[in-house]
Amino acid sequence: MIFPDAMLGMLGGGQLGRMFTLAAHSMGYRVTVLDPDPLSPAGAIADVHLKAAYQDREALQQLADTCAAVTTEFENVPAESLRWLASHCTVRPAGDAVAVAQDRIREKAFVKSCGIAVAPYAVVESEADVAKTGSALFPAILKRARFGYDGKGQARVANADEARKAFVELGSESCVLEQRIALKCELSAVVARGADGIGRAFPVAENRHRNGILDVCIVPARVTPELAQRAEQWALTIAEKLNYCGVLAVEFFVSEAGELLVNEMAPRPHNSGHYTMDACATSQFEQQVRTLCGLPLGAPKLLSPVVMVNLLGEAWQHGQPLWERVFNVPEAKLHLYGKHEARAGRKMGHYTVLGESADTALQKAVIVRSALYPDWND
Ligand code: ATP
Ligand code: MG
C-alpha cells in the first residue's frame, strides 16, 4: 500500500484531475500533474505542475522518478505513455485497458465479448462499408471511433447517403454506425476495482443530456431495482473482464422497450459520478486515490438522494451567474473548476442538491437551473 504523504502522478489537468487532487490532498497525499496548459484546473492546485506534452519523455521520466504511482483523468492520454510509465512505476489503470476504451470499435467488441448488450452497429472504415450496412440501422448515429467527447465527432444520419457524406465530413476515419435508439432514459454506473480484484459499484445515476452533453443527473435513478442492479452488475463484469484497477464508468441506454444497452465506457471517474462527492460515504475521487494506492475500497453507500446539474459556459452568457440562487438553497453545493474562460459547451462547474427523495431534489435543482440558464426554456 502507498500511504500519505507519497507523491501521486496525474496525467491530465482538467476538472477530473482537480477533483482527484482535492481528494488526494485531503487524505494527505501530494500530487504532480502533467498538463501542457499553464492554466489547467488541476495544475493550479497541484503540488507540482509539469507543463509539458503527454509524450514528453523528460516529463514522463520526472513522473516516474518522483511519483509512487501514476493515473490518468482522460481517456485520450496516449496509451503509449502509460505503457512507458508502467515499466518504471505503478500505473493504474493499465494502458491496455485504457486503449480499449479509447476506441469505440474495440470497446463495443469487448463489451459484446462479455455477453453484454450494445446497440446494433456496424464498423465503417470506408465509404464502401456504408453500403454494406443495409437499411436496418437507420436512423443512425455515425461516431468517430476515436477522440470523441461531449457528442463531438458524431453525426445523426437518416440513410446511407447521409452516412456516406457524414463519414467524409468526419475526416474519413474509422467510425461506428450505431442504430439510433428510442430512449426511455440513460443511466450510468461508476465502479471501483482494487488491485485485489474486489469491485464496488456506486448507485446507478439517471442522466439527462442536452445537445449531447450531460445536463442533469438524478440519483437514485428512477428505474426498477432489477434494472439498476443489472447496470451495476454489468459495469462490475466489464471491470473484471478487463482485469481493471481503478475507477471505471459505464454509460447505458434504456430503450423504450425497457432494454438495457451499454453505450460506452470511460476508464476514469465520470461527470455522472460527481454526485458522490456530496452524497456518498466515499467519493469517486477518493476511490480513485484508494485504487491507485492499493488501499481497500471505501463504502460507496448513498447517504441521501441527490441531483447534480452541470454548469456549462452558457451560464456565463450575461456575465457572472446568479450565484445567490445556488447559495440560497441550503441543500445545494457549488463546485467550480477554476476555468478562466467560459465557452459554450465547456464544463465550468456543477452543483448538487440533496433531497428527501430524488424527485424533491430534482424540483429544487431545476428551479436553480432555470435561474442560471435564463436562455434555456426546457
Ligand atoms: P461523452 O463523452 O460526453 O459521454 P460522447 O461524445 O462519448 O459523449 P456518446 O456518449 O456516444 O458521446 O453520445 C452522447 C449522447 O448522445 C448520449 O448520451 C445520448 O444521449 C445520445 N446518443 C448517442 N448514441 C445514441 C444512440 N445510438 N441512440 C440514441 N441516442 C444516442
Ligand atoms: Mg457518452
Image (cartoon, rainbow, N blue to C red):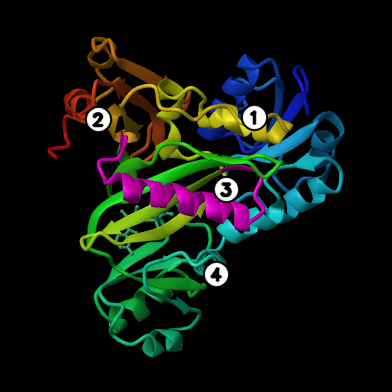
Residue for point 52% across, 25% down: 282
Residue occupied by mark 3: 267
Element type at mark 3: loop
Element type at mark 1: helix
Residue occupied by mark 1: 289
**Viewer can see residue 204:** yes
Element type at mark 2: helix
Disc 1 and disc 2 in contact, CB within 8 angstroms: no
Disc 3 and disc 1 in contact, CB within 8 angstroms: no
Q: Residues within 10 Å of mark 2 (few under 14, many from 20)?
A: many
Q: Quadrant of the C terminus?
A: top left
Residue occupied by mark 2: 358
Disc 4 CB within 8 Å of nearest ligand 1 atom: no
Does residue 232 belong to the magenta stretch?
Answer: yes
- The magenta stretch is 218-247
Q: Earlier in the sequence, mark 4 or mark 2?
A: 4
Instruction: Tell us which disc is closer to us: 4 or 3.
Output: 4
65 lies left or right of 311 = right
Element type at mark 4: helix
CA gap between label 1 and label 4 equals 30 Å
**Viewer can see residue 372:** no
Q: Residues within 10 Å of mark 1 (few under 14, many from 20)?
A: many
Q: Amino acid at mark 2?
A: Ala
202 lies left or right of 100 = left
